Image (cartoon, rainbow, N blue to C red):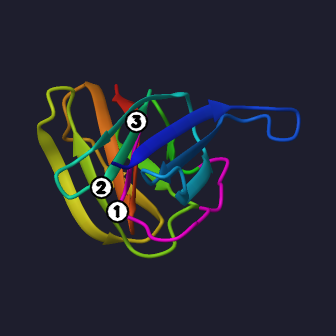
């Protein structure tokens, strides 16, 4: 059986939280590893029925499709920026880590889909003036990674 390990830490060289996730085979051989900066510590690691790996912490969820070989993901200090936050009429979304067109979803705290749009650039403005006041979660789907962050509509 495969073993998945994730570690959250920081040091004097990398003051931000960094996370390393690795997959080992049953003989203990490293199959792949990924390192990235995270807004908070990892609190959950799980696999879906397709063996995609999900890493989650406060304010983020990252999905890895199954990788082969030993790979390292380039780290980015600010992977997803939403501003202003709290917001009234619009939010600006900036995903410097996203290289291609992205899909954006906004869900409420009950998990209900409020908005879904495809083919955004990594920087865009979204009209939220018709949203009810409250807390929402914005998800950005970029290649093999899902970024997620909370924002408030005032």
Q: Is residue 28 magenta?
A: no
Q: Where does the magenta region start and end?
A: 59-78
The alpha-carbon separation of the residues under discs 3 and 1 comes to 15 Å
The alpha-carbon separation of the residues under discs 3 and 2 comes to 13 Å
Q: Are marks 1 and 2 in contact (CB under 8 Å)?
A: yes
Looking at the magenta stretch, what is its main secondary structure? loop
Q: Which residue: 57% across, 55% down?
A: 34
Question: Observer-nearest residue: 124 or 139?
Answer: 139
Secondary structure beneath label 1: loop
Secondary structure beneath label 3: strand
Q: Which residue is mark 2?
A: 52
Of discs 3 and 1, which sits in the foreground?
A: 1
**Comes first in the chain, label 1 or label 2:** 2
Q: Residue furthest right?
A: 12
Q: Where in the figure is residue 21, as x and y percent of width and height?
A: 53, 46
* Mark 1 neighbour class, 10 Å CA radius: few under 14, some 14 to 19, many 20 or more: some
Residue 116 appears in view: yes
In the image, residue 82 above or below residue 132: below
Q: Where in the figure is residue 105, as x and y percent of width and height?
A: 25, 51
- Checking the image for residue 56, the label placed there is 3
Question: Observer-nearest residue: 108 or 34?
Answer: 34
Q: Which residue is mark 1?
A: 65
* Mark 3 neighbour class, 10 Å CA radius: few under 14, some 14 to 19, many 20 or more: some
């Amino acid at each position: 059986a495969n073993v998945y390990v994730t570690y959250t830490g920081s040091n004097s060289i990398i003051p931000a939280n960094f996370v390393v996730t690795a997959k080992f085979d049953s003989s203990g051989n490293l199959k792949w590893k990924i390192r990235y900066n995270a807004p908070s510590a990892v609190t959950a690691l799980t696999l879906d029925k397709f063996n995609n790996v999900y890493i989650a912490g406060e304010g983020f969820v990252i999905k890895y499709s199954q990788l082969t070989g030993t790979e390292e993901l380039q780290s980015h200090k600010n992977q997803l920026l939403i501003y202003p936050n709290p917001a009234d009429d619009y939010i600006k979304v900036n995903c410097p880590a996203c290289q291609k067109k992205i899909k954006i979803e906004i869900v409420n705290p009950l998990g209900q889909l409020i908005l879904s749009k495809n083919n955004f650039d990594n920087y865009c403005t979204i009209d939220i003036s018709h949203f009810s006041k409250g807390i929402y979660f914005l998800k950005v789907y970029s290649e093999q990674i899902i970024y997620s962050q909370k924002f408030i509509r005032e």
